[in-house]
Structure formats: structure tokens, C-alpha cells
Image (cartoon, rainbow, N blue to C red):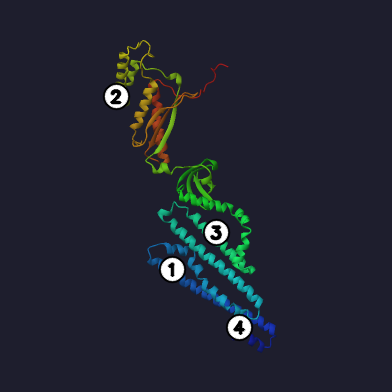
Amino acid sequence: MNELSHFFYKHFINLGLVDLSAKYLNMLVLLIILMIIIVIIDLVIRKFILNFFVRLSQRTKTNFDNVLVSNKVPRNIAHIIPLLIALNYVQIVFVDFQDMENLVEKGLQVFSIILTIWIIRSFINSIKDYLKSKDRFKDKPINSYAQVMLIAVWALGLLSAFAIVTGIPFIRFITTLGAASAVILLIFKDTIMGFVASLQVSINDMVHNGDWITFEKFGADGDVIEINLATVKVQNFDKTITTIPTYALISDSFKNWRGMEDSGGRRIKRAIIIKQSSIHYLSQEKVDALKKIELISDYLDKRAKDVNDHNLKNKADKDLLINGRNLTNIGVFRKFVETYIENHSAINKEMMIMTRQLAPTTQGIPIEIYAFSKDKRWQNYEYIMADIFDHIIASVSYFDLEIFELPTDFSNLKP
């Protein structure tokens, strides 16, 4: 080994060079030779490993090996052997320069740590990309877990590198940092909160990639496209992107529409407001006229008979309609709307169907339709709801009812 390290030194001495110059030239020549050898070995090993993985990917059905190649795992692994050669032979190159040898060795040790981080990082990214390509993992916060592991790897790597540079043993270096744990926790507060939030979101099955969520505090209303350690990205329906802190999912209230999408229908809950002044009892003549409406003809026959039997039994004075029992135009209209909804082909008959009267307001009496559309797609849902209310609004006049709307002509109003 000593002969190899001074091989060129002897030749330079024989050529008449002084001792120091011969040593520097000997180091330079050996360094150039070592670098050339390392580069050649690196290229050969890299090509061999890449060819091996390419052939392996052609023979296997899984695409995991393809993901490894795309994330440069084989390329990073190929650097290991050249690095080991450099570490073993650096003492030959710098045999006469101990301080420089120590400096270069520390540099190579730090580089070995960085290379290890690169290999682990590329491998973690490969696993992340592979799992995200699987259907059962598409809705899981894989990015968050990968980021946590990468943070841990980088933290350990950087601490190891500092320990090597400073010459302090790793355990002692970690112990020294323990005194500054409060500062470290403060610096990584968001990261820690994000990690805890990611775990809770995953364990409690709160949000998946692809879920439609509404988060009014952050102005988000759209599909979740990415769940990371610190943020959740939501693509709104206007194609803008809203970024929400991950921990906000557990600290604030938001709406997840997954339950609706997994159910048998999408809820329709909308009301029309009837003017109170247009509500009145129905005379027999009006009841007979409304019997021509097919959806409620049977209902009116039965209800009119029940009302007449009750009034005869109780000898009600029908000179005034208020006496005894009576049918009202809003009551018959409510039954018409309910029957129409129950017979609509786009409504899920297995879910709740209800037409109800809400509490009176200053505008009038709200008649609310509560039902579920079979088709949950937004565009089709809006069409179905509009089709239903088009028919209902147009039918109001047949019952001598009026829909409330603000006046457009104020010229006749008294001061």
C-alpha cells in the first residue's frame, strides 16, 4: 500500500523535483486516477443496474419496478460502490497530507449520508406512487405519510452530518439538542399538527381524495384533489384551487358530501312562498272544478265525501263556509304537489318524500318540497329540480293561489 501511494513520488524525486513538490504532484496524479476510476465504475454499474431493472420490468406483471426506475432508485444505488471505493482509497491519495485526508474523509462521509437520504427518499416516493396507482389506496392520505417519513429521514441525516462535521458523537449531539426541544417543537409546530391531523383524518375516515367538501371558512366548495401533511387542496367548481391547513379539518366544521354520493339520491329541499291573502276555503263548485285534475281527483272524491258526512252528522250551517269542516285551496294544492312528486320518474321512491307547510313569514306561507333525486350528478340534479318547480309554479293559478314576489311598480303606493 505504501509503495502504491508513493509510486509517482519516487519518479518525481528521480526527475530532480524537491520533496514537497513531488508530494503535491504525486497526490494530484493519484487523485486524477482515482476520480477517473470512480467515474468509469459509476457509469458501468449504473448502466448494468438500469439494464437489469429494464429487463426485470419486461418480465414482471407489476409496475412497481417501473416506478422504481422513474424515481431514480437504481441510479442512486449505483453510486454506492464508487463511494465505497473512494472511502477506501482516499488515504492512499492523501498519504502525505493528513489534515487534507481527514477533511476529504469527512466530506465523503457527509456525502454518504446524503446519498443514503436520496436512496431512501426515492424509495419512499416509489412506494407512494405505486400505492396511489391502486384503487383501494387512492382515497388515502398517502402524501402525508410519505412526507412524515421523509422529514424523519432528513432530520436524522442532517443530525448525523452535523455530528460528523463537528466531531461530536451522535448520541451526545442528540442529547445536547434535547435542551432545545421547546424551540424545535415551536419551529415544527405546523408539521406536528398536520401529522396528527392527517392521522385523525385517516383513522376517522373524514376525508378522501375525490370527496366533495364545502368549507365556508376558507371559501372552499369542490373536490379534494390532494391531502398533504400540512395542506389539503380543493379544486372548486369554478376550477380555482383552495388550500386548507390539514389541522383545520379537525379543528373547524366543514361539510362532506360523500354521504349523499354514497346514498340513493340527492336531496331536493326548496320552497315556494304563497301570498296569505290568496288562501281561502273551497266552495263545492270549485271542488268539482278541481276534480278535473287527474292527480287529485280520487283524493278530492274521498275528502269531499268525508267532509260532507262530517258536516251532515254535526248539522253544520254551511251558509258560511267557516262552519264545520272545509277544504282549502292551499291544502288541496299541497296534496297535488305531493302526489306530483310521488309520481315523478326522477324521484327516488324509497327515500323520504314530503310536502310541508312551514311557519308563516312576512312574505307569506312557504310550501316546501322535500325529496331525493335519483340522479346525483350536479347538472342533471339541477335540471330535475327546475323541471319540478316549473310545473309546480305554473300550476299555482289553478288553485286560485298567488306566489309572493316583491312589487316592481311603486307608483301607486301611498306615502
Residue 23: x, y in percent? 66, 82
Please name the residue shown 36% across and 26% down the image.
Answer: 335
The image shows residue 236 at horizontal and vertical percentages of 50, 44
Mark 4 or mark 1, earlier in chain: 4
**Circle 3 Cα neighbour tier, 10 Å, few/some/many (<14 / 14–19 / ≥20):** some
Tell me the distance, in whole angstroms, between the alpha carbons under discs 1 and 3.
28 Å
> How packed is label 1: few (under 14 Cα within 10 Å), some, or many (20 or more)?
some
Question: Whole-Å distance between the Cαs marked 4 and 1?
Answer: 38 Å
The residue indicated by pointer 4 is 5
Residue located at (34% from left, 29% from top): 339
Proximity of marks 3 and 2: CB atoms separated by less than 8 Å: no
Q: Which of 258/233 is in front? A: 258
Q: Indicate the secondary structure of the residue bearing disc 4.
A: helix
Where residue 299 sits in the image (x, y, percent)? Answer: 31, 24
* Residue for badge 2: 298
N-term-proximal mark, 4 vs 3:
4
Residue 160 rendering spot, x and y as whole percentages: 59, 66
Q: Are marks 2 and 1 in contact (CB under 8 Å)?
A: no
Identify the amino acid type marked 4. Answer: Ser
Crowd rating for badge 4 (residues with CA inside 10 Å; few <14, some 14–19, many 20+):
some
Q: CA distance from mark 3 to mark 2?
A: 72 Å
Q: Nearer the viewer's eye, disc 2 or disc 1?
A: 2
Q: Which residue is mark 1?
A: 53
Placement of 84 over or under 392, stated as above or below: below
Q: Nearer the viewer, mark 4 or mark 3?
A: 3
Above or below, 193 relative to 15: above
